[in-house]
Amino acid sequence: MLDLYVDYLICSTSYTTATGLSRLTSGIISHDKVTRFLSSRDFSSSDLWQIAKPLVRSIESDDGVLALDDSIEEKPYTDENDLIAWHYDHSKGRNVKGINFVTSMYQTPKGSSPVGVTLVKKTVETINPKTKKKSRKSPINKQETYRNLLTSALNNRLNFKYVLNDIWFASSENMCFIKNDLGKDFIMPTKDNRKAALSEKDLAAGKFVKIKELKPGESVVVRLKGVDLPLRLVRQVFKNGDGSTGILNLVSSDIELTDKQIIAIYQRRWKVEVYHQSLKNNASLAKSPTKTVRTQANHLFAAVCAFIKLESMSIASKVNHFALKGKIYIKALKTAFQELQKIKASVFQAENNIFSSA
């Protein structure tokens, strides 16, 4: 049923419902069976790893990277529950209602695959003592979720060299955890108001400067306050889409890397953004009217499995996800067009017969 439902998500261009899948199979699969499948049990990251494992092992290499990111699939018109709740969207700078999930994405030059997904469930109700308003929170914060996903990847013997993430996960605790506890290296951005010592002597004397005071374009080995290891800092100047310029402060625990290597490796994090786009546009992530926490979570799980299947087909055919989805859509459109011509011909023939009889 999971494989069938995943295929349905890939093929669909509209809302994905139990009735819709039943109709697609000409009633061979009843809508009740689809509903029972979605509500039968909770799928977990362990289940996802078993599905992703064949693809991951086929693309695995020594220069693999593990990119972690969170995303919110907005559900503004769906009733709030433990899964669909209000979350702060740091890319928009405001709270939005929807499903918040954190993904660990494995990437090599051969391809990419999610290897772990954790849903943020806000199961704890709190009351603001001042406003008396009720709100929800998760018993596990996203920084803990981030570290748990990294630990799972290591336990699954995943071959990766660097951990990549955005500034949201660039805490001192996470940096130390990756290097000291996991024995891996990382490249991640950091805020320009963080303080850094420019030498061991400055560190011992407690002499720190803000990163924004350092010149862009010049890399330097620093000691960030709260991080007990040397880091190579690269201040990269870039242009935004509107023509304005910005500065990205990248720090790497592998201080032997050159500036160009640090920038090039970090750019591989973009694959996780492509993953989020493909989930929405090619795997029907946002097109389910499911109502319960379990069915909503299992639909998201199936959408991630759909991405894995698309990636496998993409590697084999050398055609990207969007082009594959386009081929399916055009084929379906041609079939619909041909069916319309048959209906028109039969109607036209019936009208001719009526006029002939008259």
Image (spheres, grey):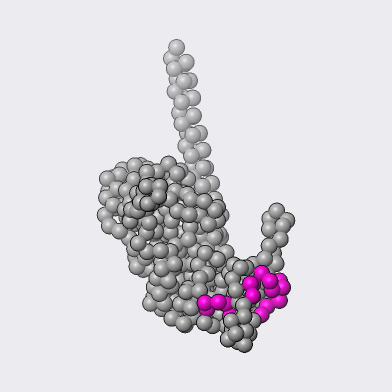
- Residue 89: tell me if it is visible: yes
Depth check, front residue: 207 or 295 = 207
Q: Residue at x 69, y 64 (%)?
A: 238
Residue lying at the far front in this picture: please name it: 130
Q: Quadrant of the N terminus?
A: bottom left
Instruction: From this view, report whether residue 300 is shown above or below residue 48.
Output: above
Magenta residues (range): 209-227
Closer to the camera, 284 or 263? 263
The stretch drawn in magenta includes residue 133: no
Relative to 193, is 93 above or below? Answer: above
Q: Which picture quadrant has residue 303?
A: bottom left
The C terminus is located in which quarter? top left
Q: Is residue 110 left or right of residue 52?
A: right
Give the x, y percent position of residue 313: 49, 62
Look at the picture and state if 168 lies above or below 162.
above
Name the residue at 72% across, 57% down.
244
* Residue 331 horizontal/vertical position (percent): 51, 47
Residue 209 quadrant: bottom right
How many numbered discs?
0
Lateral position of residue 194 relative to residue 122, left or right? right
Residue drawn at x 47%, y 49% is: 96
On the question of residue 21 being in view, the answer is: no
Residue, x 55% and y 56% (percent of image)?
A: 91
Q: Position of residue 87 (x, y in %)?
A: 45, 53
- Residue 226: give x, y in percent of width and height: 52, 77
